[in-house]
Image: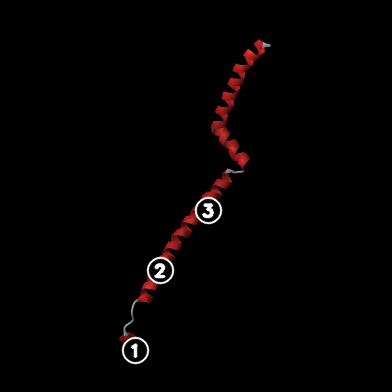
C-alpha cells in the first residue's frame, strides 16, 4: 500500500503541473472563450461597437462646441442700430 501511495504522489504532481501548463496557454484561453460564450465574431462585433461609440463621442463633442458658440452669440448685447435697420 505504501508503494502505491509513494508512486501516485509524483504522478499526481506531474498531471497537475501539465493541467496548469495547458490551462494557462493558448489552449486554455480558447477553452475559456468557448465556455464563456465569446467567439471571434463577438470580439469583432465589440471592436465595431467601440468604433461607433468613439465616433458618437466625437460627434457629440462637435455638437457641444456648436451649441456653446450659438449660446455665446445669443448672449451678446445687440446694437439698437442694427435692430432698427
Q: Element at badge 2? A: helix
Residue at screen point 64% across, 16% down: 8
Question: Pointer 2: what residue?
Answer: 66
Mark in front: 3 vs 2:
2
Name the quadrant containing residue 4. top right
Could you say where residue 36 lies in the image, as x and y percent from the top left? 61, 41
Residue 58 higher or lower than 25, as above or below: below
Residue at image coords 56%, 24%: 17
Relative horizontal placement of residue 11, taking residue 79 as reference (left or right): right
Front disc: 3 or 1: 1
In terms of secondary structure, where does tag 1 sit? helix
Q: Mark 3 points at which residue?
A: 49
**Which secondary structure lies at badge 3?**
helix
Q: Which residue is drawn at 58% across and 47% down?
A: 42
Quadrant location, the C terminus: bottom left
Residue 26: image location, x then y, percent? 54, 33
- 75, above or below 61, in the image: below
Q: How crowded is mark 1: few (under 14 residues within 10 Å), some or many (20 or more)?
A: few
Disc with the residue nearer the chain's start (3 vs 1):
3
Badge 2: how crowded within 10 Å, few (<14), some, or many (20+)? few
Image quadrant occupied by the N terminus: top right
Work out which residue is located at the far right of the displayed protein and give it. Answer: 1
Residue 35: x percent and y percent? Answer: 63, 39
Which residue is situated farthest in the bottom direction here? 84
On residue 84, the disc is 1
The disc, 2 or 1, on the residue closer to the chain's N-terminal end is: 2
Asked where in the image residue 3 lies, by quadrant, the reply is top right
Q: Distance between the residues labelled 2 and 1?
A: 28 Å
Amino acid at each position: 500500500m505504501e508503494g502505491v501511495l509513494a508512486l501516485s504522489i509524483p504522478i499526481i504532481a506531474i498531471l497537475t503541473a501539465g493541467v496548469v501548463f495547458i490551462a494557462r496557454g493558448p489552449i486554455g484561453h480558447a477553452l475559456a472563450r468557448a465556455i464563456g460564450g465569446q467567439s471571434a465574431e463577438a470580439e469583432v462585433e465589440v471592436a465595431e461597437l467601440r468604433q461607433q461609440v468613439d465616433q458618437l463621442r466625437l460627434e457629440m463633442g462637435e455638437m457641444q462646441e456648436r451649441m456653446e458658440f450659438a449660446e455665446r452669440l445669443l448672449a451678446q448685447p445687440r446694437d439698437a442700430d442694427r435692430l432698427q435697420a
